[in-house]
Image: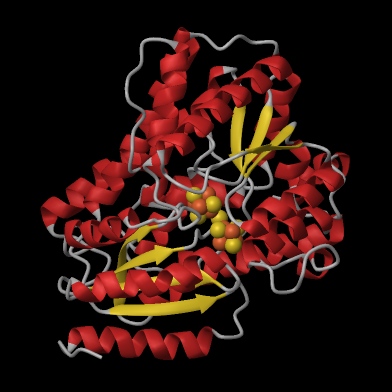
Amino acid sequence: MAENYQEMWTSLGLNLEAHQGLLAVLGDAYQSIYLSQKNRPKGMEYFDFVISEVHGLRIVELLNHKKAGKLIVGTFCVYVPEELILAVDGVSIGLCAGADVGSEEAEKYVPRNTCALIKGFMGFKLAGLCPYVESADLIIGETTCDGKKKAYEIFDEITKKVYVMELPNKKSEKGRLLWVDEIRKLGQKLSEMTGKKITLDNLRQAAEKVNAKRRALQRLSALRAHDPAPISGLDALLVNQISFYDDPVRFTTKLNELCDELEERVNSGNGVAPKGTTRLLVSGSPMAVPNWKLHSIIESSGAVVVGEEACVGERNFGNLLDDFSSPDEAMEKMADRSMGINCACFTPNDERFDDIRNLSSRLYAQGVVHYALQFCTPYMIEAYRAKTAVEAAGMPFLRIETDYSLEDAGQLKTRVEAFVEMIRDGKRS
Ligand code: BJ8
């Protein structure tokens, strides 16, 4: 890919040498983690292609959209309603980063003990490695965790593109009204920037696209309930990661094709791991591309990941946007939809424990691996109550805190292997 895009990357102000190094490391990691898997569905070829062109063809597309006058909008959180961005004919792209390149640069602005996701998105930008941030016209932040909230202030100084939505801390009626108002304000901002009015018609078209994408992701999730698992957790994670920055209509078509193939696999009993392989649910902080660390450790330890109670996972697509009959009602329904997403930034957040139990039972998971990024205080602390709730339901629970580096990979593998063995042998810790 490298040769063809040098000019484009230069025009975006990327650090060509560092960027080349990043692509080489990514290519190697992808080869050893993804392409070495056995019996992958053929439909994954499209998603392999998307990854191979993640800083190439997709950026060409975004720049072409820009030339055609479309607004490119970067986001970091599933609470930001994609429908509004599509309603003004904008393009929505996720900006979370899942690698620790650029951390040194990021640590000039934020403390060392900031979560890897925040240091990741700041580091990618500061080290001149992120064509997505450079292509974006607007970057939407939100007042979720303290780390993000404060980092956005600095990120705005650096990029001059950040707009922050005020998300409530509680799922109360007062909180809901605040969020409805914030969604309305975002709608006004998007209309101002594009000169396009938000109408019932364009909202309906946007909702149709985004709901179709969510339905396809739900379909993939449902297929993972089968034993043998028709797709690896690694591949399903990749599809979920790509859902944040691919063209939504093309993505939905390709994912539905993959699901057709997975249905055939289910009917013929063809899986990626033998029937009876230990099945685990992963729950916690989001895993942005190219964070494949935990899934890779689990699936090389004799288990298969069957679901993610996470924002790169069920929290992103579990709820659809209900039908509406006016733009005002659409904003209310968007708020209702997102208030049903149970992020640890809310207090209390008991509904998340129901989500973990329900998902485990729907996907026939035999254990829960709780994943918190180091210094992600909301999920690190909520792990205590998640453990109590999961164990009360008779399920084994493994609590993991880690970052993007591979330094602790050996130690994590030992713990995961022991957990898988305990479940396989029917023992309790
Ligand atoms: S709805 S999970 S996408 S805020 S940045 S909370 S890792 S310390 S991303 Fe999130 Fe929206 Fe919630 Fe989902 Fe922790 Fe890091 Fe904060 Fe993070």
Q: Residue at x 45, y 52 (%)?
A: 311
Horizontal placement of 171 versus 165: left or right? Answer: left
Compare residues 400 and 381 and report the one nearer the observer.
381
Compare residues 72 and 325 and report the one nearer the observer.
325
Q: Residue at x 67, y 51 (%)?
A: 149
Horizontal placement of 55 versus 352: left or right? Answer: right
Position in image of residue 280 (x %, y %): 29, 70
Which corner quadrant of the figure contains ligand 1? bottom right
Q: Relative to 256, does residue 383 appear above or below in the rendering?
A: below
Quadrant location, the C terminus: bottom left
Which quarter of the picture shows residue 71? top right
Position in image of residue 225 (x %, y %): 20, 57
Q: Relative to 402, does residue 245 appear above or below in the rendering?
A: above
Compare residues 404 and 68 and report the one nearer the observer.
404
Q: Relative to 295, does residue 125 appear above or below in the rendering?
A: above
Q: Can see residue 289?
A: no
- How many callouts does the rendering have? 0
Q: What kind of colouring is applied to the model shown?
A: secondary structure
Compare residues 136 and 189 and report the one nearer the observer.
189
Q: Residue at x 76, y 60 (%)?
A: 123
Position in image of residue 166 (x %, y %): 61, 39
Position in image of residue 144 (x %, y %): 57, 50
Horizontal placement of 279 versus 85: left or right? Answer: left
